[in-house]
Image (tube, coloured by chain):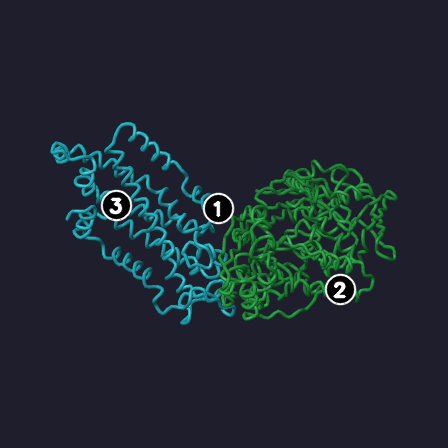
Amino acid sequence: MAKRRRTSSVILAFFALVIAVSACGRTSAVSGVLRVGNDAGFGGAETMDPYDGNRTWPTINMVFDRLIGVDKDFSPIPELALSWSSNSDLTEWSIILREGVKFHDGSDFDAEDVVYSINRMIDPEFDSPVRAVLGVITSATAIAPYEVKLNLSVGEADLPLLLADYRALMTPVGSQETIGKNPIGTGPFKMQTFDPAGTTVLLANADYFFGQPKLERIEIITFADSQSAGQALAGDQVDLLLAIDGKSSSMFGDKSKFTLQQIPTGDWNAIDFRVDQKPFDDARVRKALRIAADRQAIVDTVLGAGAGVVSCDTPVWSADPYRWEGSCPKDTEGAKALLAEAGFKDGIDIEIFTSDVEVHMVELVTVYKDQVKDAGIRVSIKIADASGFWDDVWMKEPAFVDSWGQRPATQVLNEVYRSTATWNPTGQVDSDLDAMLDDARSTLDRDERTKKYAKIQERLFENSAIFLPYHKTLTRAMSSKVQGIEPIVIDAVRWEKISVK
Amino acid sequence: MKTILTKPVASLRSRRVKPLVLFTITFHGFIAVLAPFLPLASTDAQDSGSLLQGPSLEHWLGTDSLGRDVFSRLLHGGRPSLLIAVAATLISAVAGIVIGSLSALAGGWLDDALSRLLDFLLALPTLILLLLISSFFGQDPFILSLALGLMYLAPIARVTRSTTQTLLARDFVRVARMQGAGNLAILRGEVLPNVGWVVFTEVTMQFTWILLAFSSLSFLGLGASPPTPEWGLMIAESRSYMTLNPILVISPILMLASLVLAIQALADHE
C-alpha cells in the first residue's frame, strides 16, 4: 500500500514538473504566425526604405511608425506625435513627440530623428515620391528633444493628414545607407529576413510603445500574381490577402474557414495617357478617350455590381469631404466629334499596356476596349510581365493601366497631378492647376477650401490625361483563424493587435 | 505524278486510322473554319448582369468573369492557335527539309556546320526564348510564327538529314548518279519523294508542339491578346474562378488536349 502511494506521488510529481517546465517555456501572450500574401510588383527590386519609389508595402508599415496615423474614419490620430498645432496662416506647425520610444536597436527616438526623416523625404536630390506629398515643408527644426517645428512654403490646412501618408515613416538618424536591407524602426515588428522575391520574416517588437504585439511573427510571402495568391489562401498556404477580386469572393464563402471584409475605399484604377506622346498630346483626343465609355458598366463588369463607386476622373473618393460629384455619362457622339476635330475622322487606333500584377488591371482595359469601340476608338491590348510592370511599363509606355491606393484629397491631387510630382504618371504639366492646388491647400475656411478643391476636380474632368472610372470597394480575405483586423482601410490597421488562433 | 506527299497520302489511305481520331480532327477542322459562320453568341459581348454564370439554355457553358458566352469563345478559341501553328509549321517544314537534305547531300564541312547549328537550336530552352522574343517584339503574329517556325525546325531537319543519308547509299540513287544526275535532280527525283512519310510524321508532331507552345505563351499573357478567344488565354483568364465554375478552365483544356492527342495519334498510327 505504502509502495503504491509512493509510486502515485512520483507520478504526480512528474506531471507537476512537466506542467511547470511547460509554463516556464511560454512567452506570455505572444504566439502565432501570420502569413500575408503579397504581390511581386517591383520584380525583387523592393527596398525597405520607405521614401524610395520601390518601397515594399505593407511591410514598411509593420516596421516603422508615422508621426500621425489615421483612424477608421481617416481622421488624424497620434502615433509617434502626441499633439500638433499651427500658426494662424498654417505655414508653421509645432509637433510634440511621444517620449520613451525606442528604435529596434535600442536607441531613443527623438526630434533629431524626425528632422532627419523629413529632410530625406523632401530632399530634391533624392527625389522621393513622398516629396510630392510633403514638398510643401521647407524646413524641419528640432526646438527641443521632443518637439519639432515645421515651416511650410504655403499654408496647408491638411498637413496632419499628409503626415499620415503610409510612407511618411520615421527612420533613425544616419540610416540612409543601410535602411533598404536592414531597416531599424520603432514599429510593432522587427525585420529578421528581408526577401522581397520570396518570404520576408518579421519578429514581434516586445517593447512596442502601443503594447506588445499579439503575434510572434509575420511572414510576407510573395506571389507572382493575384490568382496564385488567391489559390494560396484557399489552400491554407497564407492567412491574409489584403485585396482580392470581389468576383471570386464566393471562393472563400465557407465562413468556418474564411472571413471576408467589404471596405469602401479610395483605391482606384485608371488608364493613363502620356501627354508627351502622340496622339495623347492633343487635349481633344484625351477627352474623347475619357467620355466615350460607360463608367457604370465598367464598374459593374470589372468589379461586379455594387463593388465600386463611379468617378468622373477625380481621384478624390466618395467619403472624402472634398469630393466633387460630377456627371459623366457615356457620350459617343461627343467623343466622335472631338476625334474628328483632332484629325481622326475615321477613328483612332491606340495601344494600352496592362498586366495582372494587381486585380482588375487586365479586366479594366478589356471592358474599356468594348465600351469605346462605338466611338471609333480601336484599342489593342498589350500584356506586360507582372514582375516588372511598375519599373518597365508604368509611366514609360504611351498608355497604360494604373492602380493607386487611398489618399486624402490634398495628397492624391498633389502626388498624381502636380506638374513636378515624381509619380505624375502622364507627365502633364499644368501650372494653372499647380497654382490652384497651392491656393486650395492654404485656404483657412473649410467651405471655401472645399469649393476650391471642387474646381480643381472639374478642371481634371475637362483636361486630365487620366481616365479614372471608379473607386473600389475592397474585398479583404483571410483565414478565420486571423483575429483583430477591423474592416477598415489598411492604413488604419493596427498590426500589433492582430492574432492568429 | 509522284510528289513529296504521294507516299504519305497513299499511306494515310491504306492505314486503318481509328474513327475517333478522324472524327476529332474533322470536328476541330470544321469548327475552326466555320465558327464565325455558325449562329453563336458574340465572343466579345460583355454582360455585367450575368458574370460567372453556370450553364443555361442561353449560355450552354455559362459565362466568364466579364459575362461573355463561354461556348462561343470555346468554339472560336482554336482559330488563333491553329493559324499561328500552321504558319509556323510551314516555316519549320520548308526550312527543316532544305537544311536537312542540303546537309546530307553536301557532306563535309557544310554538313558539320549545319549539324552544329541544329544542335544549338535543340539546346535552346524554347519557352524561355519565346518569352524573351515576345517581350521584346510584342505579340505580333508574324514574328511569333517566324520565331516558332525557326525554333521547331531542328527535329525536322535532323530526320530529313538522316533519311536522306540512308537513301543516298541506296542502289537507285547510285544508278541515278551514274546516269549523270546532279544533286538537285537527285534531291527532287529520288530523295524528296521517298522521305515524304517520315518527314510528314515529324512535321505533324512538331505542329502539335507549336500549338501547345503558342497556347502556353497565351496562358502566360504573351501570345494572343485579350479579348481574343484563345484556349490558353481563356485558361489564364479563368484560373481565379476555377473553383467557382470549373467549366471555364476544363473546357479549353479538353479542346486543346483532344486536338493535340488526335493529331499525334494520326502521326503515330501504324
B45 versus A122 height, above or below: below
In what quadrant of the picture does the N terminus of chain A appear? Answer: top right
Disc 3, disc 2: CB below 8 Å? no
Q: Circle 1: is it few (<14), some (14-19), or many (20+) Cα within 10 Å? A: some
Same subunit, labels 1 and 3: the answer reads yes
Instruction: Look at the numbered disc 2 and give the secondary structure of its residue.
Output: helix
Q: How much space separates mark 1 and mark 3, taking CA atoms?
A: 32 Å
Q: Is residue A60 visible?
A: yes
Discs 2 and 1 share one subunit: no
**What color was chain B assigned in the picture?**
cyan
Distance between the Cα atoms at labels 3 and 2? 74 Å
Vertical comparison of A296 with A438: above or below: below
Q: Position of residue A410 (x, y in %)?
A: 73, 58
Report the front residue among B222 and B237: B222
- x and y percentages locating residue A476 in the rendered image: 61, 58
B40 left or right of A210? left
Q: What hue represents chain A?
A: green
Q: Quickly name the residue at label 1.
A: B135
Q: Which numbered disc, 1 or 3, marks the residue that appears first in the sequence?
A: 1
Residue underneath mark 2:
A452
Give the chain letter at badge 3.
Answer: B
The amino acid sitting under disc 1 is: Ser
Hey, what amino acid is under mark 3?
A: Thr
**Circle 3 sits on which residue?**
B201
Q: Tell me if A470 is positioned left or right of B101 in this view.
A: right
Residue at screen point 71% across, 63% down: A456
Residue closer to the observer: B41 or A110 = B41
Measured Cα–Cα span from mark 2 to mark 1: 45 Å
